[in-house]
Image (tube, rainbow, N blue to C red):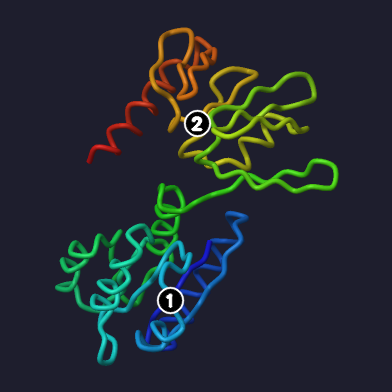
């Protein structure tokens, strides 16, 4: 995750850096943190479309406020997650004008920061990748491209929107490396991406590529609930 902190008070910036690093260590997630003391400094170094995943923006900063900075960012980047930090509750409502994910009241509590990071990481705003090695090559597959994975003997075959890949990993290893918000085991030999489910019956799920993936009887209810919740969230 590439995270920007734009905060003109060092004590609050240092606090966020500490929380983010602690969260990342607990979650085993690699993070890069870029800190700026003013919106002007960020804009001077920023290239349009720079690939950041999350921005913590202080609302009250110098001549350019966090809200004004967010408005500039949104002109070219509609996807990056924006979280406002403020010491005044009355500023919370302004986040809606720039599609902010939420606001955090300063001094930020660790549990609130962790919950915010969890929410951002589990959302579709962040592009996540699955990595594996095959002989002398390393492959980086976007989670969104993975349709399903089939386990057979010692090998796993990943079916994606572009190609198929075969490598050695267990179901447990795969589930540990994939986003639990999107992926779930639906059968002893299969993992599906809820995002690519088109429909389901009591015995199989129809995926976006037309494949029918078998479902275990004891998992149908859980899969149906996750499928429903995911699609309901898409229309809100």
Q: Examine the rendered structure and indicate whether residue 232 appears above or below residue 35.
A: above
Residue 167 falls left or right of residue 17? right
> Which of the marked residues, 2 or 1, is nearer the chain's N terminus?
1
Give the percent coordinates (x, y) of residue 39. Answer: 35, 84
| Quarter occupied by residue 74 | bottom left
Q: Examine the rendered structure and indicate whether residue 174 appears above or below residue 26.
A: above
Residue 189 falls left or right of residue 233? right
Q: Residue furthest right?
A: 135
Image point (50%, 31%), residue name: 193
User: Label 2: how many residues lie within 10 Å, few (<14), some (14-19) or many (20+)?
Assistant: many
The residue pinned by badge 2 equals: 193
Q: Measure the alpha-carbon separation of dots 2 and 1.
A: 32 Å
Residue 195: give its label: none
The residue pinned by badge 1 equals: 5
Element marked by disc 2: strand
Marks 2, 1: nearer the viewer: 2
Element marked by disc 1: strand
Image point (36%, 24%), residue name: 225
| Quarter occupied by residue 169 | top right
Residue 134 falls left or right of residue 124? right
Residue 191 falls left or right of residue 194? right
User: Label 1: how many residues lie within 10 Å, few (<14), some (14-19) or many (20+)?
Assistant: many
Give the percent coordinates (x, y) of residue 196. Answer: 45, 29
Give the percent coordinates (x, y) of residue 123. Answer: 41, 48
Q: Examine the rendered structure and indicate whether residue 72 appears above or below residue 136.
A: below
């Amino acid at each position: 995750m590439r995270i920007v902190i734009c905060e003109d008070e060092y004590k609050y910036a240092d606090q966020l850096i500490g929380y983010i690093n602690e969260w990342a260590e607990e979650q085993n997630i690699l993070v890069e943190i870029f800190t700026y003391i003013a919106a002007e400094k960020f804009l001077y170094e920023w290239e349009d479309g720079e690939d950041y995943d999350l921005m913590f923006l202080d609302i009250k900063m110098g001549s350019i406020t966090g809200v004004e900075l967010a408005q500039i960012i949104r002109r070219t980047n509609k996807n990056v997650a924006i979280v406002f930090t403020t010491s005044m509750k009355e500023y919370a409502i302004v986040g809606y004008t720039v599609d902010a994910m939420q606001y955090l009241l300063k001094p930020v509590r660790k549990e609130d920061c962790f919950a915010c990071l969890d929410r951002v990481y589990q959302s579709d705003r962040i592009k996540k990748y699955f990595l594996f090695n095959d002989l002398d090559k390393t492959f980086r597959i976007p989670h969104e491209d993975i349709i399903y994975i089939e386990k057979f003997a010692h090998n796993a075959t990943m079916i994606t929107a572009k190609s198929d890949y075969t490598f050695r990993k267990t179901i447990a290893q795969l589930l540990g490396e994939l986003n639990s918000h999107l992926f779930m085991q639906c059968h002893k030999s299969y993992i599906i991406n809820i995002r690519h489910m088109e429909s389901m019956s009591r015995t199989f799920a129809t995926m976006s590529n037309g494949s029918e993936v078998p479902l275990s009887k004891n998992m149908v209810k859980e899969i149906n609930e996750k499928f429903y919740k995911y699609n309901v969230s898409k229309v809100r």
